[in-house]
Image (spheres, grey):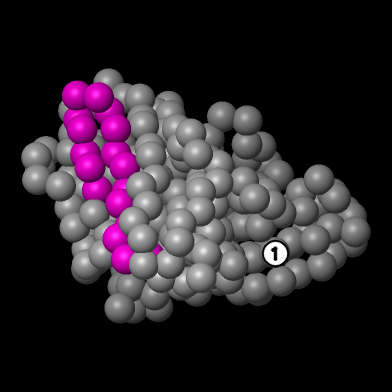
Amino acid sequence: AQTVTQSQPEMSVQEAETVTLSCTYDTSESDYYLFWYKQPPSRQMILVIRQEAYKQQNATENRFSVNFQKAAKSFSLKISDSQLGDAAMYFCAYRSAYGQFYFGTGTSLTVIP
Amino acid sequence: GAVVSQHPSRVICKSGTSVKIECRSLDFQATTMFWYRQFPKKSLMLMATSNEGSKATYEQGVEKDKFLINHASLTLSTLTVTSAHPEDSSFYICSASGGGVSYNEQFFGPGTRLTVL
């Protein structure tokens, strides 16, 4: 099975500042998808952003962007202009060519007013 | 669109009883549904993958006789925890993908908290 590693169990950021959450993964596949999900206290998983491995261009969604380094198997999430509502657990996820998803251990993000 | 519901949201049961959790895709046909288990402040652990009309594929270490999964229609999958024990207490999350929505994404239900006394 593929493994997904998030080395930062906790992160904090000042409101309006920028924070980067790291994620690395291990795979022998060449075609796959990567995702960042947000899990607020309600525990509902919310898709933040996704990246297709075959695309070289980094995905962006408003204040959220990724730095996808395929050769290094790295997929970090940058949150710009952090808002209080961004506080949550963030999970990096890998979707294999067979459709299975594998999640990292999560990063708990605190936003300081 | 792409809404997934779960029922019940919370359930408390006695040890030895069985509990059924339903997962429904409300506005799309889910050819594939996934069941996860999440411990407090931990990641999601994939338990099994089910495709409509066929047997579920269980991850290593997950007892298929204990966690029965049925995916009888394109909008409904059920997880039955048989002979539940306190160690089965956890947060169970389903997700769905396929047909009419992006195949490469999965959409999550709100989860079910199971407490076994």
Most foreground residue, A73 or A67: A67
Residue A62 horizontal/vertical position (percent): 22, 67
Question: Residue at image x 43%, y 29%?
Answer: A3
The picture quadrant where one finds residue A94 is top left
Where residue B110 sits in the image (x, y, percent)? 54, 69
- Which residue position is annotated with label 1? B113
Q: Is residue B85 visible?
A: yes
| Location of residue B66 in the rendering, given as x and y in whole percent from the top left corner | 71, 44
Figure quadrant of the C terminus of chain B = bottom right
Q: Given the image, what chain letter belongs to the residue carrying mark 1?
A: B
Is residue B95 covered in magenta?
A: no
As drawn, is B102 to the left or to the right of B74? Answer: left
Percent position of residue B14, x then y? 89, 61
Mark 1 closeness class: few <14, some 14–19, many ≥20 residues within 10 Å: some
Q: Nearer the viewer, residue A23 or B89?
A: A23
Residue nearest the viewer, comparing B41 with B70: B41
In this rendering, position of residue B17 left or right of residue A103 = right
- Residue at image location 62% in from the left, 46% down from the top: B42
Q: Is residue B10 above or below residue B71?
A: below
Does dot 1 land on a helix, a strand or a loop? strand
Q: Residue at x 36, y 30 (%)?
A: A25
- Work out which residue is located at the far top of the displayed protein and give it: A28
Q: Is residue A106 above or below residue A43?
A: above
Relative to B82, A34 lies left or right: left
Report the magenta residues as a range. Answer: A66-82
Q: Is residue B103 visible?
A: no
Task: From the viewer's perspective, tell me whether residue A109 is left or right of residue B98.
Answer: right
Q: Is residue A67 magenta?
A: yes
Q: Looking at the picture, tell me which residue is in the foreground, A30 or A98.
A: A30
Specify the amino acid type for callout 1: Arg
Which residue occupies 80% across, 61% down? Answer: B115
